[in-house]
Amino acid sequence: MKKTVLILFALIFGLSIHSQSRRRNNSVIPETNREPTEQEIAKREREIEERKEEYIDNFLLTLEGDEFQKHITKQNINSFLDARLVILKAPYEHYLDRVKALENLKESHFKDLKELISESDMTKVTELINGKFDEKEVAETKKEKRKKRKQKKDKS
C-alpha cells in the first residue's frame, strides 16, 4: 500500500514538473531579427523631421525677436542640426576628433547670428545647442494660454 502511494505521488509530481516546463517553453515568443523596410525607414525619417520642426518651433516661441529674426534663427538652427548630424555620421579615427569637430561647429556656426539677434536670445540659442532647452516649460505655457483663452471664451 505504501509503495503504491509513493509511486502514485512520484508519478503525479513528475508529470506536473514536466507539464510546467513544457508550458514555460511554449510561452516564449521567438524573436525575429529583420532589417527595416524602405517604407519603415522613410516613415521614421519623416517622423524625425516633423519632431525636429516641432522642437524648433517650440523654441522659437521663447525668443523675443520679430518674425524676420525668428525665421533667420530657424534657418541657422536647421543648418546647425544638419551639419551636426553629418559630423556624427562621419567616420573619425578617434573619438576626440569628433568632439573637437563638434566644438568647432558650435563656436563658428552662430557667429553671424550674434550680430542679428539680441543677447538674451543668443543665450537661449546657446542653451539650445548645448542641450539645456526644456521644451516641457514651453508646452506648459502653451497649455496655460489655451486655458485662459477658453475661459475668456466661455465667459463671453
Image (cartoon, grey):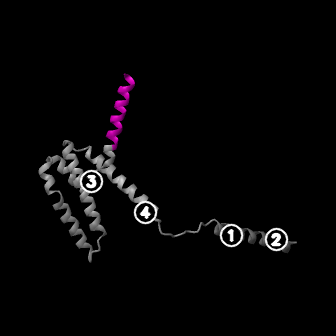
Tell me how far mark 1 sits from mark 2, CA to CA.
21 Å
State the separation of the CA atoms marked 3 and 1. Answer: 52 Å
Residue 132 numbered tag:
3
Asked if disc 4 and disc 3 are in contact, CB closer than 8 Å, the reply is no
Mark count: 4
Q: Earlier in the sequence, mark 2 or mark 3?
A: 2
Give me the disc on residue 41: 4
Indicate the position of residue 108 as horizontal and vertical percent values.
16, 61
| Residue type for callout 3 | Lys
Give the residue type at disc 1: Arg
31 left or right of 130? Answer: right
- The residue identified by callout 1 is 22
Give the residue drawn at x 21%, y 69%: 100
The secondary element bearing badge 4 is classed as helix
Q: Which residue is mark 2?
A: 8
Residues 93 and 70: in front is 70
Q: Residue at x 77, y 72 (%)?
A: 10
Residue range highlighted in magenta: 139-156
Alpha-carbon span between mark 2 and mark 3: 69 Å
Q: Is residue 84 above or below residue 69?
A: below
Q: Earlier in the sequence, mark 1 or mark 2?
A: 2
Q: Are marks 2 and 3 in contact (CB under 8 Å)?
A: no
Q: Is residue 143 visible?
A: yes
Between the residue at mark 4 and the residue at mark 3, the CA separation in whole angstroms equals 29 Å
Q: Residue type at mark 2?
A: Leu
